[in-house]
Image (cartoon, grey):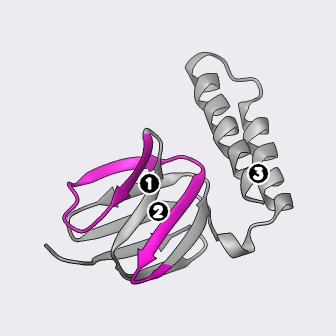
Amino acid sequence: MANTMQFDLVSPERKLASLEVSEVGIPGSEGDFTAMPEHAPILTTLRPGVLKVKSGSDVTQYLVTGGFVEVSGTATSVLAEQAIPIADVTRELVEGLVAMAENAAENLHGAELDLASKRVADTKVLLDLV
């Protein structure tokens, strides 16, 4: 069993990380999970949350607002709608994300409203970070 895997994190603006890691904590839309070397292949969506990347004894965290993750036995790739290093996250930034999620939920109905309401709730949890 390999001890590390390739990890890549990109957002529309830039590539934020590309390194060998031992694990990645992922806020999946169906629940949080940890990807490690030799993980079973999976392709899933992200919910707003904190992505935790462990490389050696270092842990780096990023706030993500959504996107996609692909895990294979040798690599984990994250394509995030937005990804911000935790050190750069401010209360004002998170409040802005909450307001955008609430605005997107306006005038929706049925299943679309359910999904948008979940996104609002997931985004509001991020206020506990700041």
| Residue placed under numbered mark 2 in the picture | 79
Amino acid at pointer 3: Leu
Residue 11: percent from left, percent from top: 55, 68
Dot 2 crowding, Cα within 10 Å, few <14, some 14–19, many 20+: many
**Amino acid identity at mark 1:** Phe
Q: Nearer the viewer, residue 94 or 103?
A: 94
State the separation of the CA atoms marked 3 and 2: 23 Å
Give the quadrant of residue 121: top right
Look at 23% across and 78% down and name the residue there.
3
In which quadrant is the N terminus drawn?
bottom left
Per the rendered image, the range of residues in magenta is 31-58
Looking at the picture, does residue 97 appear above or below residue 36?
above
Q: Secondary structure at mark 3?
A: helix
Q: Quadrant of the C terminus?
A: bottom right
What percent of the width, then of the height, locates residue 66? Answer: 55, 51
Task: Please provide percent x and percent y for residue 53.
Answer: 46, 71
Please tell me which residue is depicted at 27% across the width and 51% down the height of the picture: 42
Circle nearer the viewer, 1 or 3: 3
Report how far apart the C-alphas of labels 1 and 3 lie in the structure: 22 Å
Residue on which disc 3 sits: 127
Q: Residues within 10 Å of mark 1 (few under 14, many from 20)?
A: some
Q: Where does label 1 land, which residue?
A: 68
- Cα distance between the residues tagged 1 and 2: 5 Å
Amino acid on which the number 2 mark rests in the picture: Leu
In the image, residue 31 sits, relative to residue 109, either above or below, namely below
CB-based contact (under 8 Å), mark 1 and mark 2? yes
Q: Residue at x 41, y 80 (%)?
A: 55
Which of discs 3 and 2 lies nearer the camera? The answer is 3
Q: Secondary structure at mark 2?
A: strand
